[in-house]
Image (cartoon, rainbow, N blue to C red):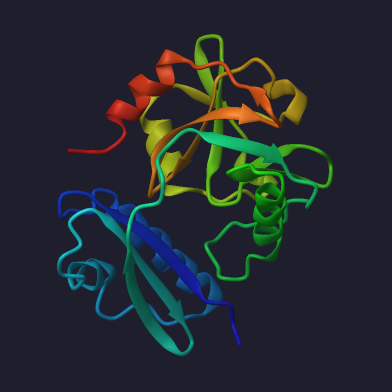
Amino acid sequence: MTAAVFETIRVRAGRAPLLERHAARLVAACAALGLPLPEPPLADLVSRQAGTENGVVRVEVSDRGIAVTARELPPLAPLAVVVAATPHVPYPRKITSRTAFEAAQAEARAVGADDALLVTPHGLVAEGTVWNIFWWEVDRLATPPLYLGVLPGVARARVLELAPAIERECVPGDLLGRGLFATNAIRGIVAIARLNGAPVPHDLRTTQLADRFWPE
């Protein structure tokens, strides 16, 4: 059986502001994996979740059909993150086979952290378990390059529209002393407050960027 693909979509005030981006990614993933395109379209599937004023709608597509569920928002507080021992594996599409990410999350919970940052087998910073990572380098942002196999996140793309940024390789030690934040399409921009137990300096630019994240 082919792994299912899915999208988790934020609803704010009854609207899904990043819906078109989710739809494009879902269509591309279905085409790449030979899965049927969702019918009805994603916009209709999301709109059928009546009463979702502020929350999350999850749409999963597999060779068995489509499943749509809704849930409440997760916590939006700054994150305490640890670097996982579990190595990153390429994750260019949102598929339901997520063994490495689940193992990394378990590592984080075992030490009382909120989440984990995965690095490649070569020691390069890749991505979080459900988020992309950014950091500030003097006058601009940086984030790991997609060729490392990180997910081309919907929120990642939104941030790259809003602020000058570069893609570059780094190791976890390069992040020390820098302002860090996580992005995903549910939480938007969330500051990382601690990395491996050490405080992460707050950067006012993260707050300013977060205020501009959600399209009107």
- Name the image quarter holding residue 198: top right
The mark total stands at 0
Locate residue 119 relative to residue 168 in the image: left or right. Answer: right
**Quadrant location, the N terminus:** bottom right
- Name the image quarter holding residue 192: top right
Task: Kindly identify the residue that appears in the image at 20 percent across and 62 percent down.
Answer: 52
Picture layout, residue 36 above or below residue 19? below
**What is the residue that sits farthest to the right in this orientation?**
122
Locate residue 23 relative to residue 120 in the image: left or right. Answer: left
Picture layout, residue 189 above or below residue 34? above
Residue 58 at what x, y percent from top left? Answer: 37, 67
Picture layout, residue 189 above or below residue 45? above
Work out whether residue 102 or residue 120 is closer to the camera in this orientation and state it.
102
Residue 176 at what x, y percent from top left? Answer: 69, 19
**Quadrant location, the C terminus:** top left
Task: Kindly identify the residue that appears in the image at 36 percent across and 24 percent down.
Answer: 209
Task: Kindly identify the residue that appears in the image at 41 percent across and 43 percent down.
Answer: 155
Task: Kindly identify the residue that appears in the image at 34 percent across and 20 percent down.
Answer: 208
Residue 51 at what x, y percent from top left? Answer: 15, 65
Picture layout, residue 193 above or below residue 56? above
**What is the residue that sits farthest to the top in this orientation?**
138
Locate residue 69 relative to residue 94 in the image: left or right. Answer: left
Residue 80 at what x, y percent from top left? Answer: 59, 35
